[in-house]
Image: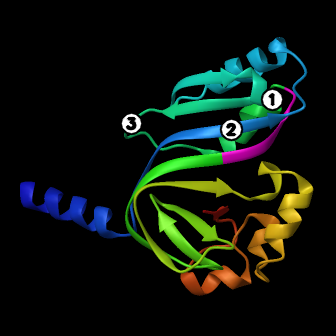
Amino acid sequence: MKQFIIACFLVVLGSGSFAQFSKASLQASGLTCALCTKAINNSLEQLSFIKSVKPEIKTSSFIIEFKEGVAIDIDALRKGVEDAGFSVAKLQLTGNFDQLAVQSDEHASLNGKTFHFLSVKKQTLSGEQVLTVVDKDFLPAKEFKKYSKSSSMSCVQTGKAGDCCKKEGLTADTRIYHVTI
């Protein structure tokens, strides 16, 4: 039985690349005062995967530290900011990567989530790296337009797997996160 459990663990571990996201930098838009910052801070602190939130009032940003070994929910970060009455202007995730091969306009699986890399050169990510989320609700419209032009895949516009993603075995409702380095 013990060998079976170890074998299952190794299969799960090897079924896609691994990256442990440890922290994030989130810049919000629409803030006008310290009370705005406090509203976002309180909203983000309610998320179960967040260890700490440190606001930086001058830049309208928040340094977020994630709990180790706990899955993070990127969309919950955005929703937390929106629930406080604001929007995300920029989200950068810092993770520790282990030999993840990436190239522009290609998908990669990380911890059971699918990431679509845009405007990147072909490379292998190892060690600490910062990914910027470039989905529609994670940056200003002008920047989104720039990144969305770098791909003809429909998932860039919707954030969901489209016909372009089905060859990889993804179903139509699978969330695709678009990122750049």
Q: Which residue is under mark 1?
A: 83
- The residue most toward the left is 2
Secondary element under disc 3, as helix, strand or loop, is loop
Tell me if 41 is positioned left or right of 24 in this view: right
Circle nearer the N terminus (3, 2): 2
**Which quadrant: the N terminus?**
bottom left
- Secondary element at tag 1: helix
- Tell me the number on the disc at residue 6: none
* Separation of residues labelled 3 and 1 (CA atoms): 25 Å
Q: CA distance from mark 1 to mark 2?
A: 15 Å
Q: Main secondary structure of the magenta part?
A: strand
Residue 136 in the image: state x and y as whole percent.
82, 57
Category of crowding for the residue at label 1, using alpha-carbon neighbours closer than 10 angstroms: few (below 14), some (14–19), many (at least 20): some
User: What's the distance in space between the residues labelled 3 and 2, CA to CA?
Assistant: 19 Å
Q: Amino acid at mark 3?
A: Glu
Q: Earlier in the sequence, mark 3 or mark 1?
A: 3
Give the mark nearer the N terminus: 1 vs 2.
2
Figure check: 98 above or below 121: above
Task: Give the camera-side residue of 152 and 46.
Answer: 152
Q: Position of residue 38 (x, y in %)?
A: 75, 15
Mark 3, residue position:
68
| Residue 84 locus on image (x, y percent) | 81, 25
Which class describes the residues within 10 Å of circle 2: few (<14), some (14-19), or many (20+)? Answer: many
Instruction: Specify the quadrant that holds the C terminus.
Output: bottom right
Q: Is residue 159 magenta?
A: no
Q: Which residues are magenta?
A: 85-91
